[in-house]
Amino acid sequence: MMKRIVFGIAVALSFVPALAAQEFDFKALDKIGANASSSTNITLDGDTLRMAAGFLGGVQDKDAANVKSLVANLKAIYVRSYEFEKPGQYNEADLAPLRAYLKQPAWKAIIDVREKQESTQVYLLPSPNNKLAGVAVVSTEPTQVTIVYVNGTLEMSDLQKLSGTMGIPDIRQLDMVKPADGKTDKKAK
Amino acid sequence: MSQDSGNFEKQLREALGREDAPAGFAARVLAAAAAEKQVRVMPVAVAKLPKLPKQSWMQRPFALAIAATIAALAIVPAVVLDYQRREEARGMKAKQDLMVALSITKNQLQQARAKVQRSSRNTQ
Amino acid sequence: MVFSVALRFLRNREVAEELAQDVFLQCYRQLDRLESAEHACSWLRRAICHRAIDELRKQRYRPAIGLEGIPEPASSGAMPDMLLRDRLREMVECLPEKARMVVVLRYQEDLVPTEIAEMLDMPVSTVKSHLHRSLALLRGRLEKKVLRAGIGLPATEVCS
């Protein structure tokens, strides 16, 4: 009992300085794509998300309503996706800052699959009342790295919607226009 | 204790730091002011603004400077329209980026699920 | 500044923008009474404070969650809490209206107690009392949640 109290006090006392640490800075991942033949770099903050949702006129009403409902409580979406011409063109160590960040106790790794030279992790950041405060996916293959980070309040059912029940087009169906240099750099901000 | 207090107050300052008004806010205010002016005062030319006595001009240069600027709001509607067109272009781009981001998210979550299923089949 | 004060106080972007726009229009209508940029700034700040407090009293909306519903920070003191700022903002939102505005004016606008007292038409001693009690309450809530999480207890508690 005494040890628990001492531990609790130690946690409380160490809490205040630790609070000065910053949020994850996605600029730390810029190095990964240095040799990429193709990259997709999207950062959507809260205002841009709401603006975007307001322009969902081309999608069927029900789907548009679902997407609007999903993004209404989101703070940001970050996507970094890099393709390389051949293996060995990115350094796994460049992902270390993100992996260290997602190793915090608050984040729960619900999927961690490694096979051959591919690995995929899915992390959730639980919050009270059976909600989520964040979802992160880190996927690496020999010639591809993809990171997705959704920050904000989500319902558990939103995960299913994100996985494909919301009328979101398949990525292969989207017309990704590539400039002459072969790089797709879609920056929203 | 005082250091902890100082740290906490610093965190509070960071948390409550000023946040910029949303995109287009200034334009909306200007447009509303222009609309109000047109309703209240007709399409008043600058020449019709009352000439203030020298004494009051000297006393309120700030107010006159703002009034002169607002008088120029006769051209605001065109500026606002242009701004609205640019905002629409921004919105369409944001929508496209949102759909791409959601598509990639969907793809990644589906692939993760498929890998888990494959992995559990292999271990059976 | 105007929008930001309204947003930090009300935590509702749409209402904050609406109020801020109203205040600017009100300022525009009273331009001839403003004598300097400082006067205008002070006028705007005072106007948004009072409008925001009035807005809250109309109860057109309520805070999304009470203090007890705010997720606890990461349980380990050695790890950063990326949502700390959001949690602090949520906790400030749960303060009573006058205390909340005092905290916003102090920590967003960096006003001293005498300036806050003049802005809100209250005695300086009351401003200081609000500041002292609010800080103690916010610190206590944050530390209590960490302590409970650190020894494995759930974070739920009655908001008192």
Image (tube, helix red, strand yellow):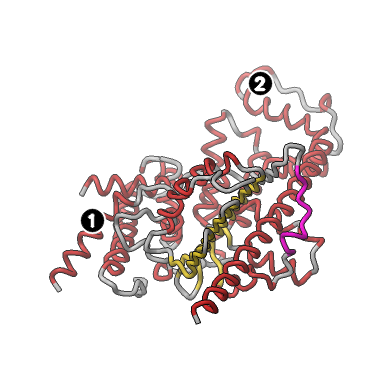
Kindly identify the amino acid type of the residue bearing the numbered disc 1. Leu
Residue C1: name its quadrant.
Answer: top right
Residue at position x 20%, y 59% from top?
A10
Q: Is mark 2 on a helix, strand or loop?
A: helix
x%, y% of residue A109?
45, 66
Q: Position of residue A1 (x, y in %)?
A: 15, 74
Q: How far apart are marks 1 and 2 (CA)?
A: 60 Å
A175 with respect to C104 (left or right):
right
Provide the chain ID for the residue under circle 2.
B
Q: Do labels 1 and 2 share a chain?
A: no
Residue C105 vs residue B113, the one in the foreground: B113
Reply above or below: C74 against A66.
above
Label 2: few (<14), some (14–19) or many (≥20) C-alpha neighbours in 10 Å: some
Q: Is mark 1 on a helix, strand or loop?
A: helix
Asked if one can make out residue A45 in the rendered structure from this viewpoint, the answer is no
Identity of the amino acid at label 2?
Trp
Q: Name the residue under label 2.
A: B57
Give above or below for B60 relative to A145.
above
- The location of residue A134, given as percent across then percent down, is 51, 62
Q: In which quarter of the image is residue A36?
A: top right
Rendering coords of residue B7 (x, y %): 30, 46
- x 54%, y 56%: residue: A140
Asked whether residue A171 is drawn in magenta, I would say yes
Q: Is residue C3 toward the left or the right of residue C113 in the image? A: right
Q: Residue placed farthest to the bottom in the image? A: B124
Q: Give the range drawn in magenta.
A: A169-178
Disc assigned to residue A13 = 1
**Residue A107 visible in rendering:** yes
Q: Do the residues labelled 1 and 2 touch (CB within 8 Å)?
A: no
Instruction: Name the residue nearer the viewer: B75 or B38.
Output: B75
Q: Is residue C136 magenta?
A: no
In front of the other: A132 or B58: A132
